[in-house]
Amino acid sequence: MTENGPYEATANDPLGLDSGSTRNRELADLRAELVHPYPAENPRLLIDPPVPTADVVNLAPCADKSLLLQTAPDPPASNLPPQRPELRGPWTAWLGNLLVDSAARSWLASATVHAAAVLLLSLLAFTRPQQASLGWLEGTWQQENLAALDLDLNDLDAAAGGQFVVPHNPAQHTAITETSPQHSLTDRAHIDLHTESGKSIVWSPAIEHISRPLTPRGGGMSGRLTQNRRGLALSGGGTEGSEAAVELGLAWLATHQFADGGWRFDLVTCPQCGGACRNSGFVKSTTASTGFALLCFMGAGYTQHEGPYQETVAKGLYYLINKMLLTSFGGDLRDNSIISDEDDGIPLTKKQGDMYSHAIATLALCEAYAMTGDENLAGPAQQAVDFTVHAQHEKGGWRYEPNEPGDTSVTGWQLTALKSASLGQLKVPRAIWYRAAEFLDSVEDERGATYGYKSPSKERRSMSVVGLFSRMLLGWPRDHTPLRKGMARIADQVPHQNNMYFNYYASQALHHMGGSGWQRWNTRMREYLVKSQATSGHERGSWYFQEAWSNNGGRLYTTALSILTLEVYYRYMPMYQEVFVSDAP
């Protein structure tokens, strides 16, 4: 023991470390670690060699502390571990540890390879495609002189016959229900006319492209309002004489209504007529004849709630509702019934006739509902529409029997009925319109300027005007070249004295197009009808023209088409005049 502690420094042992003692051996090992920080068995355990500090060295107190700062001599080169560059900072330390660790090197290599693969795939996925080779298309092109078509719209002159009024509070229609026997069609308060300015329906309101068979255009019924009718007639091409002819025709129809509320083409069986009118028809369908008569009254704005023929219209509507046969597909308005053999004591009834009858009767129910919002009509009208939807052929047309390949004539009536249904906010599936457009594609010629009956044709004038009018309903814009071309040809013709079917459709289509073509046509058509109306006897107020279809429908058929033609000025608002464009399809 010395004054400096239990250890004594000697010349050979300046720190007083005696290898023979345990304490001396521990200090010797510590000194060796300070000089050689890498253990021989694993030289990579340490990254940064520890730096000797005064606190560590003070474990061996001695009299001469300056000796603690001396550095031990380096061991022989053969005994030193591998040297490596000094790493400083946290990122460099982490990178160095990553490089020297074998597992880390494997992970880094794998990550590099995968990153390269992802980069290569992204380059392949986003590489700009090579330009396809070009081919040659040969053909001819002909310039259409659209300026020569001369189909500018007429500006309505409100001063000519009164101010045009559109109601600001159209009727809110109720949900579709079956007809309630507890209420009469005439015992409820009058409901304002639902017009194209009213509540939007479920269709898209902004479809303009010709390839989409839907339309947001007008064509509504607000012109039939009492305060609108006269002004539109006198400013749109009608006269006091044409309006008087309409009233005479309606009076003739009212006189020939049967006690059950319906009308018949066969006038011989009418008690009020008894054969006093010549040219009786023989078609047996009473729903078609009743539908025609009702359309004339409603075209003039007379409904079961308004006008001098409220009871007449109400009885006619009830007749159609009672003739409807409810099926799982909807309400069938073809009224010719076949009663077959009894099945377990129950007579089996089946509808026959053709879809003309169903379409005309459906159109009457839908117009009555759209004009009045009468909740008693909602159910029957929707049922009739549902049957129309069911009866459409898979290729888009309608014909005499349900699901029969279509023809243009029957299809035109069905589309008109569905248009009125949409105005009344009844449910019409969108697919119906797309399929109908496909059918018209199959019977069109000259890119849609002409139409045939069941196949393309340039010679069927009546079918062409029906096809063009149907295209209007389906959304063709007014400036579409085939529409303008086809309507210019129609406008160049004079009214046919032996074809009121053609005259009826031509008047509607040209009225929607407007322009000088409409003006030329209208003057001739209007004067022809006013002058050819019967003015004496029991036939007073009626029309009859000897033509192909008048033998079947007779005087009632030609009278109905003549009245509807003279009502063209206000019956449907022009589809292409901005003041009448609406949210309704």
Image (cartoon, rainbow, N blue to C red):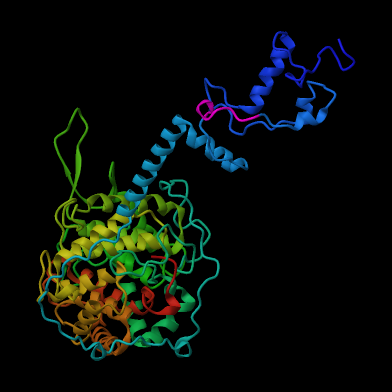
Q: How many marks are shown on the rendered structure?
A: 0
Look at the picture and state if 560 lies above or below 333: below
Prevalent SS, magenta region: loop
Image quarter (top left, top right, bottom left or bottom right) of the C terminus: bottom left
Which residue of the protein is positioned furthest toward the right in this rendering? 3
Q: Is residue 307 visible?
A: yes
Q: Where is residue 33 in the image (x, y as percent from the top left)?
A: 64, 24
The residues colored magenta run 73-81
* Front residue of this view, candidates 191 and 24: 24
Residue 53, image quadrant: top right
- Residue at position x 67%, y 29% in the image: 72
Look at the picture and state if 35 lies above or below 199: above
- Residue at position x 18%, y 50% in the image: 403
Image quarter (top left, top right, bottom left or bottom right) of the N terminus: top right
Residue 117, image quadrant: top left
Which residue of the protein is positioned furthest toward the front in this rendering? 11
* Front residue of this view, candidates 585 and 20: 20
Look at the picture and state if 414 lies above or below 458: above
